[in-house]
Amino acid sequence: MSDFQVVVNTMPVRYSFCSKQIKFLRGTNMWPVPSLSTSRFFEFVAPIDVKNAAPQDMDFLFDAVSIIIRVSNSRRFPFVCRQRETYYQTRYVKFTIADNMEKKIRCIAVGQMCEWFVNHWSKRISLITYNYEPIVAVLQNWRITNYHGKNVLHSEFGFSKLYINPKSKEIDIPNYLHGYMIEDDEDDIMMEVVEKN
């Protein structure tokens, strides 16, 4: 990139912690450069951080990784279309993810993200080999938003990504699932001990 200005970020909606932004000028030029890193630079948020998010936390995008435990039917936000608008972006699906400590985060995927999630989720659970094993969701660039009085992770149009059981060098999914299953097995053993007593 050449011929641009670096200015103070005054945008009300922010996508990073950086206090500066690049301002394009009439003569700004850009050209592709191969990536120097294969990292996706995840910034995972804990369920407690979503629940107790401060107002300034809602200005930034976060990532999360957990097991999908609940999925609602897709719905539509109440919305009246103006001329040349569509109802497509009003579709949403709510789902809940939980870590191995049973701490939950509610999530809302809207528009294209809703469509993507519903398609991939329904394909995954309708496989003949699916046997109710845990499914890991990795959310990238989601915003903390207040929805009906509770903080949720909300997809951000054009920025959010969602991966279901991804194959990634940065996240050891088999190890994550193993930790989740061990916690679940310990709960089952405790229930058996209580029943025997």
Image (spheres, rainbow, N blue to C red):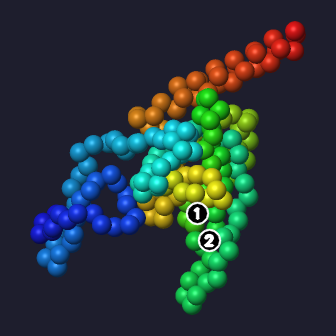
Residue 60, position as x, y percentages in the image = 41, 54
How many badges with numbers are in the image?
Answer: 2
Res. 166 visible in picture? no
Quadrant of the frame with the C terminus = top right
How far is mark 1 from mark 2, CA to CA?
Answer: 7 Å
* Residue type, label 1: Val
Q: Residue at x 12, y 66 (%)?
A: 2
Q: Most extreme residue toward the top, as rendered? A: 197
Q: Is 26 on the left or on the right of 167, as rendered?
A: left
Say which residue label 2 marks: 90
Q: Specify few, some or many for label 2: CA neighbours under 10 Å numbering under 14, 14-19, or 20 or more.
A: some
Q: Where residue 181 is drawn, which disc sits there?
A: none
* Residue type, label 2: Thr
- Residue 93 occupies which quadrant of the picture? bottom right
Do residues under tags 1 and 2 come within 8 Å of each other at their CB atoms?
A: yes
Q: Specify few, some or many for label 1: CA neighbours under 10 Å numbering under 14, 14-19, or 20 or more.
A: many
Q: Residue at x 41, y 42 (%)?
A: 43
Residue 131, position as x, y percentages in the image = 74, 35
Q: Where residue 110 is drawn, which disc sits there?
A: 1
In the rendered image, the vertical position of residue 129 relative to residue 53, given as above or below: above
Q: Residue at x 55, y 39 (%)?
A: 48
Q: Is 87 on the left or on the right of 8, as rendered?
A: right
In the rendered image, the vertical position of residue 143 relative to residue 22, given as above or below: above
Q: Nearer the viewer, residue 195 or 58?
A: 58
Res. 80 visible in picture? yes
